[in-house]
Image (cartoon, rainbow, N blue to C red):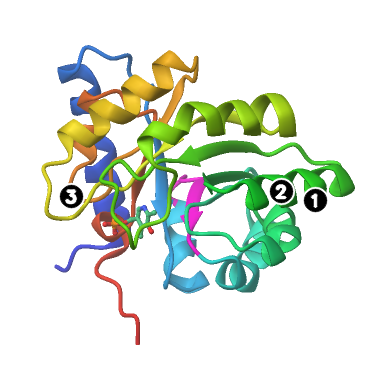
Amino acid sequence: MTETAIDRLKSVNADLQKAEADAGRENGSVNLIAVSKTFGANDIRPVLEAGQRVFGENRVQEAMGKWPALREEFDGIELHLIGPLQSNKAKEAVQTFDVVHTVDREKIARALKTEMEKQGRNLPCFVQVNTGEEPQKAGIAPKETDAFIRLCRDEIGLNIIGLMCIPPVEDAPGPHFALLEKIARRNGLSQLSMGMSSDYETAVDFGATYVRVGSAIFGSRDYG
Ligand SMILES: *Cc1c(COP(=O)(O)O)cnc(C)c1O
């Protein structure tokens, strides 16, 4: 029999539980974000029926096309924006998502704050850190992160709860996760969004509180 998304969701949850125990962390201390980008409502629905409620999408437009209807079918959905955000999409982002992981520029931070005030919503946010200092990748440089957190939190007034990173594909992820944890700790931030299908167990070992897992649950993506 072929494996279904429900089978894979179960095994990811079992792996997470084991990784928590191995790291001496409390059962349930890591939140699983099921990353459903490129998958349609018919692929997502069985995962909702299996009880998963926290999902991640990386494009505002794509999320707007499928999640409002799913929210009418299922209670308690929590939707995380994990992809880059343009300030002209801030309005739609604040309407569609519950948590934003990709705050990395002053312009985005200010646009989000303005929209949240207009809409009367206060979304928890993560600052994305470019731990590998890759020129093509989103995120604030590690050495600029302390000042950027202060700007977002103290001056702009965003509800910054933690940090997010995507390590370079060619690197061992551990040192990147350790760096993110160190920056978060010295800034008094308790939440760490790190770890994907290939490295979520390592991320748990380094203190992840949110892992973002796509293909290990939904299967490989077809970008058409
Ligand atoms: C797509 C994506 C993921 C999930 O990737 P998988 O390797 O499929 O688990 C996690 N984080 C971000 C930011 C993504 O864009």
Q: Please name which of the two marks, 2 or 3, marks the residue nearer to the observer.
A: 2
SS at mark 2?
Answer: helix
Q: Which labelled disc corresponds to residue 112?
A: 2
- Specify whether tag 3 is near ligand 1 (CB below 8 Å): yes
Q: In this view, does 95 lie to the left or right of 201?
A: right
Residue under circle 3?
A: 198
Q: What stretch is highlighted in magenta?
A: 50-58
x and y percent of residue 61 in the render?
61, 72
Asked if labels 2 and 1 touch by Cβ distance under 8 angstroms, the answer is: yes
- Compared with residue 128, is residue 57 higher up or lower down, i.e. above or below? below
**What amino acid is at disc 3?**
Ser
Residue located at (42% from left, 14% from top)? 186
Q: Residue furthest bottom?
A: 224
SS at mark 1?
Answer: helix
Residue under circle 1?
A: 115
Asked if labels 3 and 1 touch by Cβ distance under 8 angstroms, the answer is: no
Which circle's residue, 2 or 3, is located before the other in the chain?
2
Screen quadrant of the C terminus: bottom left
x and y percent of residue 213 in the render?
32, 50
**What amino acid is at disc 2?**
Leu
**What amino acid is at disc 1?**
Glu
Q: Residues within 10 Å of mark 3 (few under 14, many from 20)?
A: few
Residue located at (28% from left, 54% from top)? 134
x and y percent of residue 163 in the render?
45, 33
Find the distance from the CA under tag 2 to the CA under tag 3.
Answer: 31 Å
